[in-house]
Amino acid sequence: MDDLSALPPLERLRTIMARLRDPVTGCPWDVEQSFATIAPYTIEEAYEVADAIERQAWDELKGELGDLLFQSVFHARMAEEAGLFDLDDVAGAIADKMIARHPHVFGADSNAKSAEQQVQDWEAVKAAERAARARGGVLDDVAHGLPALMRAEKLQKRAARVGFDWPEIGMVIDKIAEEARELSEARETLPQDKIDEEMGDLLFVMANLARHLKVDPETALRRANAKFTRRFAFIEAELARRGKRPEESDLAEMDALWDAAKAAGL
């Protein structure tokens, strides 16, 4: 076999991907894959990158970024096989986009702007790009494949740009109280599909509150998940010291241990 290690890293990776997809000598699993079957892995790898950053696991981040890069190479290879585009086209397209969206760096615009003004300029450029693609509605190109909480925030942000938004946070909080009441009433009187709908309405407004508070709801919930995991692990460890498992305890005991975990700063 020829020495792949002699190739530049990106060319080596592209060659490896081509070998894996070879219909005769490649890996049967890789050959069978399609855009649709690989997409869930792409999302998973992106979350693993975010997780490494959240934990400040810098020794892991390089590997996670490599896994995510490999997903792009995989999709580009399948596109090349289908005659759609290749990895060079992908790299060229994003390079062109970054240049077009940063006229204050690569063009004649002044770069003496605040970060907030640059974000506004960025959104204006993206709006012009959407118009050029003849997208009909304001919400048309908010990706359906995003996690639901993230998509809710993006839908609301897009609608807010054209004035469809509550002008103050207090009105959002009032709406949360209203939706919570409706969910409580639905729980007592309505079928499960209506309860699901009311729960969705409440979550949607919670995402809106996060946007108004300039909180990333995905990050906030991910941190809450991590905090719950730490505190529940504390409960399990303390119960184990008492010779118990969680199912052998009761809510009062576990709740007291939860408070102890909070007091310990977990």
Image (tube, helix red, strand yellow):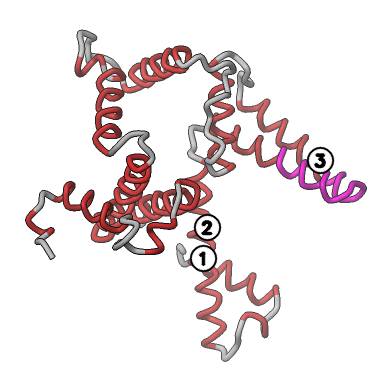
The residue depicted at 48 percent of the width and 66 percent of the height is 230
Amino acid type at image mark 1: Thr
Spatial distance from mark 2 to mark 3, Cα to Cα?
26 Å
Q: Residue furthest front?
A: 24
Amino acid type at image mark 2: Asn
User: Badge 1 is on which residue?
Assistant: 229
Amino acid type at image mark 3: Arg
Label whose residue precedes the other's in the sequence (1 or 3): 3
Question: Neighbour class for label 3 at 10 Å: few (<14), some, many (≥20)?
Answer: some
Q: Secondary structure at mark 1?
A: helix
Image quarter (top left, top right, bottom left or bottom right) of the N terminus: bottom left
Question: Neighbour class for label 1 at 10 Å: few (<14), some, many (≥20)?
Answer: few
Measured from the top left, where is residue 167 in percent x and y? 61, 18
Instruction: Return the mark for residue 225.
Output: 2
User: Badge 3 is on which residue?
Assistant: 181
Q: Secondary structure at mark 2?
A: helix
Q: Nearer the viewer, residue 220 or 35?
A: 35
